[in-house]
Image (tube, rainbow, N blue to C red):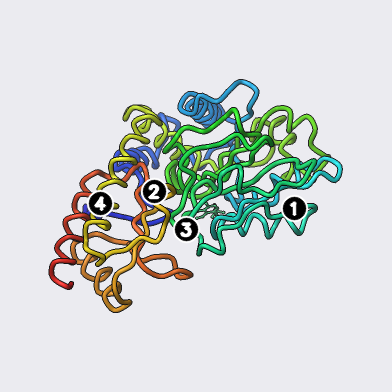
Amino acid sequence: MKRVYNFSPGPCVLPQEVITSLADELPEFDDSGMSLIEMSHRGEHFTAIHEQTIALLRELTAVPDDFHILLLQGGATLQFAMAPMNLAIGDQPGAYITAGTWGNKAFTDAKKLGQAYQAWTGEPSGFTTMPTKGDLQLQPNTRFIHSATNETIHGVRFANFEDFGVPQVLDMSSEYLTRPIPWEHVDVVYGGAQKSLGPAGVCVVFVRDSVVEQAPDLPAYLSYANHVKGNSLANTPPVFSIWAMNKTLTWMKQQGGVAAMERRSVSRAAMLYAAIDQSDGFYSNPVDPTYRSLTNIVFRLPSEELEKAFVAQAAKEDLVNLKGHRSVGGIRASVYNALPDEAVTKLVDFMNNFAARDS
Ligand SMILES: Cc1ncc(COP(=O)(O)O)c(C=O)c1O
């Protein structure tokens, strides 16, 4: 079976072991005479997988006891609406940091639901930097501050997490379990699984108990309290996605957990940025070096023709899915947890050879 080096921004590469194990176990689960995806989500087999998945998340993230873990559908996109709905208390506004496309989308949805304002935007810089506390324009009585901690399209991320003096809501989709979650600063953390945790179909939400206790009464699926009460089984869960996530989390634990994922991500991003910075301007990255993403490394070449040639020639060497997002162009290498180190060394070699040939 052929395996390419897959730099897709998501859905993306999963560990080979996970794919193989899913394929092996898919036809029949544990001598039951049926596949796990054909069983009741309330039966003993799926219940065990579900409980173990939540336990693995608890262990890997070292989440404090006053947080609930929810496995939901609707992706991170549903959380753009669900988080502000559940956090709405009276007329306290939500503050939004819009450092790229995803922060913007969250802000757009929040404005439709109630009081939301932009506390800072990266737009004047072309979304190439992140704010510090002093940059934020906070209104009195702000309920929460929302941000996408790593902007997947613009390749910019918070280098450190700061105490903003107001509880934070973090979309960590594109660096989930690639760095520790700053529990002391947050009330809600969410992200779709399809970058670092498994296939698409499940969104992992961490929510502080005090939020659940104060949340307004909402329609069933939109209510964190309803999902807490039902242990994420209030309706039929995405069983396949949870099963595959269970296997990916098990793999992650065997690799050394979040600390190991973070170490690898730091060193792999450093290799790619070194290739960019040492190319005499052939490759360029627009992001303020302090805030460069470790998981989505974006860069430009001197012309769009060269970028097209780069993507096409890389694909011939099995380095695939390197085209930048259609809204910004250029090249983007997404380097998530399951990408083998070899993919990065191959890409760096390819970049050096391409620049030597075409500059
Ligand atoms: C940072 C970020 N937030 C939200 C989303 C949207 O996630 P979903 O497709 O799970 O709704 C994405 C998708 O790429 C993302 O990168």
Q: Earlier in the sequence, mark 4 or mark 2?
A: 4
Kind of residue at badge 3: Thr
Separation (CA) of disc 4 from disc 1: 40 Å
Decide: marks 4, 1 in contact (CB < 8 A)? no
Identified by mark 4, the residue type is Ala
Q: How far apart are the alpha carbons under marks 4 and 2?
A: 15 Å
Q: Position of residue 35 (x, y in %)?
A: 45, 40
Q: Are marks 1 and 3 in contact (CB under 8 Å)?
A: no
Q: Residues within 10 Å of mark 2 (few under 14, many from 20)?
A: many
Q: Residue furthest top?
A: 65
Residue under numbered circle 2: 295
Q: Looking at the image, do the residues carrying marks 2 and 3 touch, with CB atoms under 8 Å apart?
A: no
Depth check, mark 4 against mark 1: the one in front is 4
Q: Nearer the viewer, mark 4 or mark 2?
A: 4
Which residue lies under the disc numbered 3? 128
Is residue 286 rendered to the left or right of residue 312? right
Measured Cα–Cα span from mark 3 to mark 4: 18 Å
Please report the residue visible at 39 percent of the width from the left and 48 percent of the height from the top. Answer: 295
Residue 168: horizontal and vertical position, in percent? 64, 39
Indicate which label's residue lies in the foreground, 2 or 1: 1
Left or right of 60, for residue 260: left
Amino acid type of the residue that numbered disc 2 sits on in the rendered structure:
Thr
